Amino acid sequence: MTSETGPSRPGASWTGASWTGVPAEHPFGLHTLPYGVFTDAAHPQPRIGVAVGEAILDLTAASAALLPEHASLFSGGSLDALLAAGPASWSAIRAALRRWLSDERHAAVLTPLLVPATEVKMQLPFTVADYVDFYSCEQHVTNVAQILRPGQPALPANWRHLPASYHGRAGTVVVSGTPVRRPSGQRRHPDGTVTFGPSTALDFEAEVGFVVGTPSTLGRAVPLSGFAEHVFGVCLVNDWSARDIQFWESVPLGPMLGKSFATSISPWVVPLAALDAARIHPPARDPRPLPYLDDTGAEPWGLDITLQVRLNEMLISRPLFRRMYWTAPQQLAHLTSNGASLRTGDLFASGTVSGAAPGERGCLIELSWNGATPLRLADGSTRSFLADGDEVSITATAPGPAGSTLGLGEVHGRIRPA
Protein backbone atom coordinates (compact mmCIF):
# COMPACT_ATOMS: atom_id res chain seq x y z
CA MET A 1 0.00 0.00 0.00
CA THR A 2 1.02 3.61 -0.20
CA SER A 3 0.42 6.75 1.75
CA GLU A 4 0.08 10.35 0.62
CA THR A 5 3.28 11.26 2.41
CA GLY A 6 5.46 8.23 1.78
CA PRO A 7 4.85 5.64 -0.95
CA SER A 8 6.07 2.14 -0.41
CA ARG A 9 5.88 -0.17 -3.39
CA PRO A 10 5.33 -3.85 -2.60
CA GLY A 11 7.10 -6.26 -4.89
CA ALA A 12 10.14 -4.05 -5.42
CA SER A 13 12.31 -7.16 -5.88
CA TRP A 14 10.11 -8.49 -8.67
CA THR A 15 11.32 -7.36 -12.13
CA GLY A 16 8.18 -8.20 -14.10
CA ALA A 17 10.33 -9.55 -16.96
CA SER A 18 8.54 -11.72 -19.51
CA TRP A 19 9.72 -13.96 -22.34
CA THR A 20 6.93 -12.39 -24.42
CA GLY A 21 9.01 -9.24 -24.76
CA VAL A 22 6.44 -7.08 -22.98
CA PRO A 23 8.37 -4.40 -21.07
CA ALA A 24 8.01 -4.58 -17.30
CA GLU A 25 6.79 -0.96 -17.33
CA HIS A 26 3.99 -1.57 -19.87
CA PRO A 27 0.58 -0.61 -18.39
CA PHE A 28 -0.61 -4.13 -19.27
CA GLY A 29 2.57 -5.83 -18.07
CA LEU A 30 2.76 -8.79 -15.70
CA HIS A 31 1.83 -6.54 -12.78
CA THR A 32 -1.64 -5.90 -14.27
CA LEU A 33 -2.99 -9.00 -16.09
CA PRO A 34 -6.63 -7.89 -16.48
CA TYR A 35 -9.33 -10.30 -17.60
CA GLY A 36 -11.76 -9.84 -20.47
CA VAL A 37 -13.82 -11.64 -23.10
CA PHE A 38 -13.05 -11.53 -26.82
CA THR A 39 -13.88 -12.96 -30.22
CA ASP A 40 -11.98 -12.89 -33.49
CA ALA A 41 -12.49 -13.90 -37.10
CA ALA A 42 -11.14 -17.40 -36.54
CA HIS A 43 -13.15 -18.06 -33.37
CA PRO A 44 -16.61 -16.44 -33.24
CA GLN A 45 -17.39 -18.03 -29.88
CA PRO A 46 -16.45 -15.78 -26.91
CA ARG A 47 -13.28 -16.75 -25.05
CA ILE A 48 -11.66 -15.53 -21.85
CA GLY A 49 -8.50 -13.53 -22.36
CA VAL A 50 -5.80 -11.82 -20.34
CA ALA A 51 -4.17 -8.65 -21.68
CA VAL A 52 -0.40 -9.04 -21.99
CA GLY A 53 1.07 -5.88 -23.46
CA GLU A 54 -0.40 -5.41 -26.93
CA ALA A 55 -1.58 -9.03 -27.11
CA ILE A 56 -4.28 -11.14 -25.51
CA LEU A 57 -3.55 -14.56 -24.07
CA ASP A 58 -6.36 -17.00 -24.87
CA LEU A 59 -6.94 -18.24 -21.33
CA THR A 60 -9.70 -20.61 -22.40
CA ALA A 61 -7.15 -22.61 -24.39
CA ALA A 62 -4.19 -22.00 -22.06
CA SER A 63 -6.02 -23.23 -18.98
CA ALA A 64 -7.06 -26.43 -20.74
CA ALA A 65 -3.39 -27.15 -21.46
CA LEU A 66 -1.68 -25.89 -18.31
CA LEU A 67 -4.31 -25.51 -15.58
CA PRO A 68 -6.92 -28.22 -16.15
CA GLU A 69 -8.18 -28.08 -12.55
CA HIS A 70 -9.46 -24.55 -13.26
CA ALA A 71 -10.24 -24.88 -16.96
CA SER A 72 -14.00 -25.01 -16.36
CA LEU A 73 -13.86 -21.42 -15.09
CA PHE A 74 -12.88 -20.24 -18.58
CA SER A 75 -15.11 -22.37 -20.81
CA GLY A 76 -18.40 -20.47 -20.55
CA GLY A 77 -17.66 -17.41 -22.67
CA SER A 78 -17.84 -14.92 -19.78
CA LEU A 79 -16.05 -14.13 -16.53
CA ASP A 80 -19.06 -15.25 -14.49
CA ALA A 81 -17.60 -18.57 -13.32
CA LEU A 82 -14.25 -17.00 -12.48
CA LEU A 83 -15.93 -14.24 -10.48
CA ALA A 84 -17.93 -16.79 -8.49
CA ALA A 85 -14.89 -18.99 -7.76
CA GLY A 86 -13.69 -16.81 -4.87
CA PRO A 87 -10.41 -15.39 -3.56
CA ALA A 88 -8.44 -18.64 -3.29
CA SER A 89 -9.02 -19.44 -6.95
CA TRP A 90 -8.41 -15.82 -8.01
CA SER A 91 -5.04 -15.87 -6.26
CA ALA A 92 -4.00 -19.27 -7.61
CA ILE A 93 -4.86 -18.35 -11.20
CA ARG A 94 -3.06 -15.01 -11.03
CA ALA A 95 0.04 -16.71 -9.63
CA ALA A 96 -0.09 -19.28 -12.43
CA LEU A 97 -0.36 -16.58 -15.09
CA ARG A 98 2.66 -14.71 -13.75
CA ARG A 99 4.61 -17.96 -13.58
CA TRP A 100 3.71 -18.94 -17.15
CA LEU A 101 4.58 -15.55 -18.60
CA SER A 102 7.88 -15.14 -16.76
CA ASP A 103 9.22 -18.69 -17.31
CA GLU A 104 10.35 -19.36 -20.88
CA ARG A 105 9.63 -23.06 -20.48
CA HIS A 106 5.97 -22.24 -21.15
CA ALA A 107 6.65 -20.29 -24.35
CA ALA A 108 6.10 -23.19 -26.73
CA VAL A 109 2.57 -23.78 -25.43
CA LEU A 110 1.54 -20.15 -24.97
CA THR A 111 3.07 -18.36 -27.96
CA PRO A 112 0.40 -19.67 -30.41
CA LEU A 113 -2.27 -18.53 -27.93
CA LEU A 114 -1.18 -14.86 -27.92
CA VAL A 115 -3.54 -12.96 -30.22
CA PRO A 116 -2.81 -9.35 -31.32
CA ALA A 117 -5.26 -7.05 -29.57
CA THR A 118 -5.91 -5.24 -32.85
CA GLU A 119 -7.44 -8.41 -34.33
CA VAL A 120 -10.16 -9.04 -31.73
CA LYS A 121 -13.53 -7.67 -30.75
CA MET A 122 -14.01 -7.19 -27.03
CA GLN A 123 -17.30 -8.29 -25.45
CA LEU A 124 -19.17 -7.43 -22.26
CA PRO A 125 -16.92 -9.27 -19.79
CA PHE A 126 -19.53 -10.53 -17.30
CA THR A 127 -23.28 -10.75 -16.80
CA VAL A 128 -24.27 -7.63 -14.88
CA ALA A 129 -26.58 -8.71 -12.07
CA ASP A 130 -27.35 -5.40 -10.32
CA TYR A 131 -25.97 -1.92 -10.84
CA VAL A 132 -25.63 0.77 -8.16
CA ASP A 133 -24.05 4.16 -8.75
CA PHE A 134 -22.71 6.17 -5.83
CA TYR A 135 -22.23 9.92 -5.33
CA SER A 136 -19.01 9.89 -3.32
CA CYS A 137 -16.85 12.75 -4.58
CA GLU A 138 -17.22 15.82 -2.35
CA GLN A 139 -15.89 18.21 -4.99
CA HIS A 140 -18.36 16.94 -7.61
CA VAL A 141 -21.26 17.38 -5.19
CA THR A 142 -20.00 20.85 -4.29
CA ASN A 143 -19.50 21.92 -7.91
CA VAL A 144 -22.97 20.78 -8.96
CA ALA A 145 -24.55 22.50 -5.96
CA GLN A 146 -22.79 25.76 -6.79
CA ILE A 147 -24.05 25.49 -10.38
CA LEU A 148 -27.66 24.59 -9.62
CA ARG A 149 -28.24 26.02 -6.14
CA PRO A 150 -25.88 28.98 -5.67
CA GLY A 151 -25.91 30.40 -2.19
CA GLN A 152 -27.35 27.24 -0.63
CA PRO A 153 -25.52 24.53 1.34
CA ALA A 154 -23.45 22.41 -1.02
CA LEU A 155 -23.82 19.07 0.78
CA PRO A 156 -27.12 17.41 1.68
CA ALA A 157 -27.54 16.87 5.42
CA ASN A 158 -26.90 13.12 5.10
CA TRP A 159 -23.93 13.23 2.72
CA ARG A 160 -21.11 13.05 5.28
CA HIS A 161 -22.93 10.30 7.17
CA LEU A 162 -23.54 7.77 4.39
CA PRO A 163 -22.45 6.99 0.81
CA ALA A 164 -25.40 8.28 -1.23
CA SER A 165 -26.39 6.29 -4.33
CA TYR A 166 -29.13 5.32 -6.75
CA HIS A 167 -30.04 1.89 -8.12
CA GLY A 168 -29.42 1.82 -11.88
CA ARG A 169 -30.48 -0.44 -14.71
CA ALA A 170 -28.24 -3.50 -15.20
CA GLY A 171 -29.74 -4.33 -18.60
CA THR A 172 -28.36 -1.19 -20.23
CA VAL A 173 -24.75 -1.61 -19.10
CA VAL A 174 -22.78 -1.98 -22.35
CA VAL A 175 -19.19 -2.69 -23.25
CA SER A 176 -16.81 0.04 -24.39
CA GLY A 177 -17.23 0.93 -28.05
CA THR A 178 -20.99 0.40 -28.11
CA PRO A 179 -22.63 3.49 -29.72
CA VAL A 180 -24.87 5.50 -27.39
CA ARG A 181 -28.20 6.68 -28.76
CA ARG A 182 -29.26 10.15 -27.61
CA PRO A 183 -32.20 9.55 -25.26
CA SER A 184 -35.58 11.25 -25.37
CA GLY A 185 -37.65 12.21 -22.36
CA GLN A 186 -39.55 14.91 -20.55
CA ARG A 187 -37.89 18.19 -19.69
CA ARG A 188 -39.07 21.44 -18.18
CA HIS A 189 -38.19 24.70 -19.91
CA PRO A 190 -37.38 27.99 -18.11
CA ASP A 191 -40.86 29.33 -18.92
CA GLY A 192 -42.42 26.37 -17.09
CA THR A 193 -43.64 24.41 -20.10
CA VAL A 194 -43.00 20.67 -20.20
CA THR A 195 -42.17 18.89 -23.45
CA PHE A 196 -40.99 15.48 -24.65
CA GLY A 197 -38.09 15.10 -27.05
CA PRO A 198 -34.38 14.36 -27.48
CA SER A 199 -32.12 15.44 -24.65
CA THR A 200 -30.28 18.71 -25.31
CA ALA A 201 -27.98 18.33 -22.29
CA LEU A 202 -26.29 14.97 -22.81
CA ASP A 203 -23.26 14.45 -20.56
CA PHE A 204 -20.65 11.89 -19.56
CA GLU A 205 -19.43 10.99 -16.07
CA ALA A 206 -15.94 9.61 -15.45
CA GLU A 207 -16.09 6.89 -12.80
CA VAL A 208 -14.43 3.75 -11.45
CA GLY A 209 -16.49 0.56 -11.11
CA PHE A 210 -16.14 -2.39 -8.75
CA VAL A 211 -17.15 -5.91 -9.82
CA VAL A 212 -18.56 -8.35 -7.27
CA GLY A 213 -17.41 -11.96 -7.45
CA THR A 214 -18.64 -14.07 -4.54
CA PRO A 215 -22.24 -13.52 -3.42
CA SER A 216 -23.42 -12.84 0.12
CA THR A 217 -26.32 -14.17 2.17
CA LEU A 218 -29.64 -12.33 2.18
CA GLY A 219 -30.12 -10.69 5.57
CA ARG A 220 -26.41 -10.48 6.41
CA ALA A 221 -24.46 -7.27 5.95
CA VAL A 222 -20.94 -7.38 4.50
CA PRO A 223 -18.50 -5.64 6.89
CA LEU A 224 -15.67 -3.40 5.76
CA SER A 225 -13.27 -6.30 6.34
CA GLY A 226 -15.21 -8.45 3.86
CA PHE A 227 -14.56 -6.24 0.84
CA ALA A 228 -11.72 -8.28 -0.70
CA GLU A 229 -13.61 -11.52 -0.08
CA HIS A 230 -16.45 -10.39 -2.33
CA VAL A 231 -15.04 -7.90 -4.85
CA PHE A 232 -13.00 -9.34 -7.70
CA GLY A 233 -11.69 -6.22 -9.38
CA VAL A 234 -12.21 -2.84 -11.00
CA CYS A 235 -13.22 -1.45 -14.38
CA LEU A 236 -13.81 2.01 -15.81
CA VAL A 237 -17.34 3.40 -16.06
CA ASN A 238 -18.98 6.17 -18.07
CA ASP A 239 -22.35 6.90 -16.48
CA TRP A 240 -23.96 8.74 -19.42
CA SER A 241 -26.43 11.35 -18.16
CA ALA A 242 -29.17 13.39 -19.84
CA ARG A 243 -29.08 16.38 -17.50
CA ASP A 244 -32.31 18.02 -18.67
CA ILE A 245 -34.27 14.78 -18.23
CA GLN A 246 -32.46 13.97 -14.97
CA PHE A 247 -33.05 17.29 -13.23
CA TRP A 248 -36.77 17.40 -14.08
CA GLU A 249 -37.47 13.84 -12.91
CA SER A 250 -35.16 13.71 -9.87
CA VAL A 251 -37.49 15.40 -7.38
CA PRO A 252 -38.64 13.64 -5.26
CA LEU A 253 -37.25 10.16 -5.98
CA GLY A 254 -33.99 10.63 -7.88
CA PRO A 255 -32.55 9.71 -11.30
CA MET A 256 -34.23 7.23 -13.60
CA LEU A 257 -34.66 7.85 -17.35
CA GLY A 258 -31.93 10.47 -17.37
CA LYS A 259 -29.44 7.72 -16.49
CA SER A 260 -30.93 4.36 -17.46
CA PHE A 261 -30.52 4.57 -21.26
CA ALA A 262 -26.83 3.49 -21.20
CA THR A 263 -23.85 2.95 -18.92
CA SER A 264 -20.55 2.00 -20.58
CA ILE A 265 -17.82 -0.10 -18.94
CA SER A 266 -14.29 -0.94 -20.03
CA PRO A 267 -13.78 -4.46 -21.42
CA TRP A 268 -10.95 -5.28 -19.00
CA VAL A 269 -11.47 -6.07 -15.31
CA VAL A 270 -8.30 -5.45 -13.30
CA PRO A 271 -7.98 -7.74 -10.24
CA LEU A 272 -7.91 -6.05 -6.84
CA ALA A 273 -4.55 -7.75 -6.21
CA ALA A 274 -3.00 -5.66 -8.98
CA LEU A 275 -3.85 -2.46 -7.08
CA ASP A 276 -1.85 -3.16 -3.92
CA ALA A 277 0.71 -0.46 -4.72
CA ALA A 278 -2.03 2.09 -5.43
CA ARG A 279 -3.70 1.87 -2.02
CA ILE A 280 -3.60 5.07 0.04
CA HIS A 281 -5.35 6.59 3.02
CA PRO A 282 -8.61 8.31 2.08
CA PRO A 283 -9.33 11.93 3.04
CA ALA A 284 -10.14 12.72 6.67
CA ARG A 285 -13.85 12.35 7.48
CA ASP A 286 -15.80 14.72 9.69
CA PRO A 287 -17.92 13.65 11.47
CA ARG A 288 -16.46 10.25 12.19
CA PRO A 289 -18.57 7.64 10.38
CA LEU A 290 -20.88 5.32 12.28
CA PRO A 291 -19.22 2.06 13.38
CA TYR A 292 -20.24 -0.03 10.35
CA LEU A 293 -18.60 2.59 8.07
CA ASP A 294 -15.71 3.57 10.33
CA ASP A 295 -12.40 2.54 8.74
CA THR A 296 -10.21 4.40 11.24
CA GLY A 297 -7.13 2.29 11.83
CA ALA A 298 -8.07 -0.24 9.15
CA GLU A 299 -5.97 -1.10 6.11
CA PRO A 300 -6.55 1.83 3.73
CA TRP A 301 -8.64 1.40 0.61
CA GLY A 302 -8.31 4.81 -0.96
CA LEU A 303 -6.87 4.33 -4.45
CA ASP A 304 -4.32 6.53 -6.20
CA ILE A 305 -5.91 6.36 -9.65
CA THR A 306 -5.61 9.13 -12.23
CA LEU A 307 -8.28 9.25 -14.91
CA GLN A 308 -7.87 10.90 -18.31
CA VAL A 309 -10.94 12.13 -20.21
CA ARG A 310 -10.81 12.86 -23.93
CA LEU A 311 -13.52 14.40 -26.10
CA ASN A 312 -12.97 13.80 -29.82
CA GLU A 313 -9.37 12.78 -28.99
CA MET A 314 -8.63 16.02 -27.10
CA LEU A 315 -7.57 15.63 -23.46
CA ILE A 316 -10.00 17.76 -21.47
CA SER A 317 -9.61 16.56 -17.87
CA ARG A 318 -7.52 14.49 -15.44
CA PRO A 319 -9.73 13.66 -12.43
CA LEU A 320 -7.96 12.26 -9.35
CA PHE A 321 -9.68 9.30 -7.68
CA ARG A 322 -7.59 9.56 -4.51
CA ARG A 323 -9.79 12.43 -3.31
CA MET A 324 -12.97 10.33 -3.13
CA TYR A 325 -14.57 10.83 0.28
CA TRP A 326 -16.14 7.37 0.57
CA THR A 327 -14.11 4.26 -0.31
CA ALA A 328 -15.33 1.16 -2.13
CA PRO A 329 -15.40 -0.97 1.09
CA GLN A 330 -17.59 1.69 2.72
CA GLN A 331 -19.87 1.75 -0.30
CA LEU A 332 -20.21 -2.04 -0.21
CA ALA A 333 -20.79 -2.06 3.55
CA HIS A 334 -23.53 0.55 3.19
CA LEU A 335 -25.08 -1.18 0.19
CA THR A 336 -25.55 -4.37 2.24
CA SER A 337 -26.14 -2.77 5.66
CA ASN A 338 -29.90 -3.38 5.48
CA GLY A 339 -29.34 -7.07 4.68
CA ALA A 340 -29.46 -6.72 0.89
CA SER A 341 -27.49 -9.58 -0.66
CA LEU A 342 -24.76 -9.49 -3.29
CA ARG A 343 -24.87 -11.54 -6.48
CA THR A 344 -22.01 -12.56 -8.74
CA GLY A 345 -21.73 -9.85 -11.38
CA ASP A 346 -23.05 -7.00 -9.27
CA LEU A 347 -21.47 -3.74 -10.36
CA PHE A 348 -21.21 -0.64 -8.21
CA ALA A 349 -19.65 2.60 -9.42
CA SER A 350 -17.88 5.33 -7.50
CA GLY A 351 -19.84 8.28 -8.80
CA THR A 352 -18.27 11.08 -10.82
CA VAL A 353 -14.60 11.66 -10.01
CA SER A 354 -13.91 15.38 -9.98
CA GLY A 355 -11.82 18.21 -8.58
CA ALA A 356 -11.82 21.92 -7.87
CA ALA A 357 -9.64 22.93 -10.83
CA PRO A 358 -11.24 23.01 -14.31
CA GLY A 359 -8.74 20.44 -15.56
CA GLU A 360 -9.85 17.94 -12.92
CA ARG A 361 -13.61 17.96 -13.46
CA GLY A 362 -15.24 14.68 -14.43
CA CYS A 363 -18.29 15.74 -16.48
CA LEU A 364 -19.36 18.45 -18.91
CA ILE A 365 -21.84 20.15 -16.60
CA GLU A 366 -18.83 21.01 -14.42
CA LEU A 367 -16.36 21.61 -17.24
CA SER A 368 -18.72 24.07 -18.98
CA TRP A 369 -20.32 25.24 -15.71
CA ASN A 370 -23.72 24.26 -17.14
CA GLY A 371 -23.01 26.19 -20.34
CA ALA A 372 -21.81 29.42 -18.71
CA THR A 373 -18.24 28.80 -19.92
CA PRO A 374 -18.40 26.39 -22.90
CA LEU A 375 -15.46 24.08 -23.45
CA ARG A 376 -13.40 24.97 -26.54
CA LEU A 377 -12.14 21.97 -28.55
CA ALA A 378 -9.08 21.66 -30.76
CA ASP A 379 -11.09 22.31 -33.94
CA GLY A 380 -12.37 25.62 -32.57
CA SER A 381 -15.86 24.36 -31.82
CA THR A 382 -17.33 24.63 -28.32
CA ARG A 383 -19.35 22.29 -26.13
CA SER A 384 -21.66 22.88 -23.23
CA PHE A 385 -22.97 19.32 -23.63
CA LEU A 386 -22.35 16.48 -26.09
CA ALA A 387 -23.23 16.80 -29.77
CA ASP A 388 -24.21 13.94 -32.07
CA GLY A 389 -21.06 12.28 -33.39
CA ASP A 390 -18.95 13.19 -30.35
CA GLU A 391 -16.77 10.44 -28.92
CA VAL A 392 -15.80 10.32 -25.24
CA SER A 393 -12.85 8.22 -24.09
CA ILE A 394 -11.88 7.60 -20.45
CA THR A 395 -8.60 5.92 -19.53
CA ALA A 396 -6.85 5.53 -16.19
CA THR A 397 -3.52 4.63 -14.62
CA ALA A 398 -2.31 3.82 -11.11
CA PRO A 399 1.02 3.12 -9.41
CA GLY A 400 2.22 -0.45 -9.85
CA PRO A 401 4.95 -2.47 -8.10
CA ALA A 402 8.58 -1.35 -8.22
CA GLY A 403 7.69 2.09 -9.57
CA SER A 404 5.81 0.77 -12.59
CA THR A 405 2.54 2.11 -13.97
CA LEU A 406 -0.59 0.01 -14.02
CA GLY A 407 -3.21 0.54 -16.74
CA LEU A 408 -6.96 0.22 -16.24
CA GLY A 409 -7.76 0.22 -19.94
CA GLU A 410 -10.28 2.42 -21.71
CA VAL A 411 -14.02 2.98 -21.95
CA HIS A 412 -15.23 4.91 -24.98
CA GLY A 413 -18.47 5.57 -26.80
CA ARG A 414 -19.79 7.71 -29.65
CA ILE A 415 -23.11 9.58 -29.57
CA ARG A 416 -25.72 8.71 -32.19
CA PRO A 417 -28.75 10.87 -32.95
CA ALA A 418 -32.06 10.22 -31.21
Image (tube, helix red, strand yellow):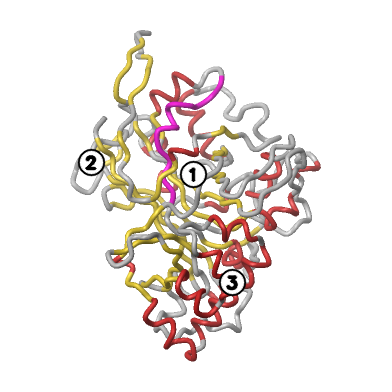
Relative to 371, say whether 78 is above or below.
below
- Horizontal and vertical percent position of residue 326: 64, 44
- Between the C-alphas of marks 2 and 1, the distance is 25 Å
Around disc 1, counting alpha carbons within 10 Å, would you say few (fewer than 14), some (14 to 19), or many (20 or more)? many
Taking depth in this image into account, of 21 and 74 the one nearest to the observer is 74
Which circle, 3 or 1, is nearer the viewer?
A: 3
Which circle, 3 or 2, is nearer the viewer?
A: 3
**Amino acid type at image mark 2:** Gly
Q: Is residue 348 left or right of residue 388?
A: right
Taking depth in this image into account, of 120 and 65 the one nearest to the observer is 65
Around disc 3, counting alpha carbons within 10 Å, would you say few (fewer than 14), some (14 to 19), or many (20 or more)? some
Magenta stretch: includes residue 416: no
**Lower position in the chain sequence, tag 2 or tag 1:** 1
Which residue is at a point 40% across and 23% down the rendered structure image? 245
Residue 354, labelled with which disc?
Answer: 1
The boundaries of the magenta stretch are: 253-265
Which residue is at a point 68% across and 57% down the rendered structure image? 228
Relative to 417, say whether 273 is above or below.
below
Circle 2 sits on which residue?
389
Magenta stretch: includes residue 260: yes
- Horizontal and vertical percent position of residue 258: 42, 28
- Horizontal and vertical percent position of residue 218: 73, 40
Relative to 185, say whether 342 is above or below.
below
Circle 3 sits on which residue?
93
Quadrant where the C terminus lies?
top left
**Lower position in the chain sequence, tag 3 or tag 1:** 3
Which SS class for mark 3? helix
The residue furthest right is 291
Which residue is at a point 55% across and 64% down the rendered structure image? 73
Magenta residues, dominant SS class: loop
Q: Is residue 83 left or right of residue 372?
A: right
Q: Which of the 4 image quadrants contains residue 409? A: bottom left
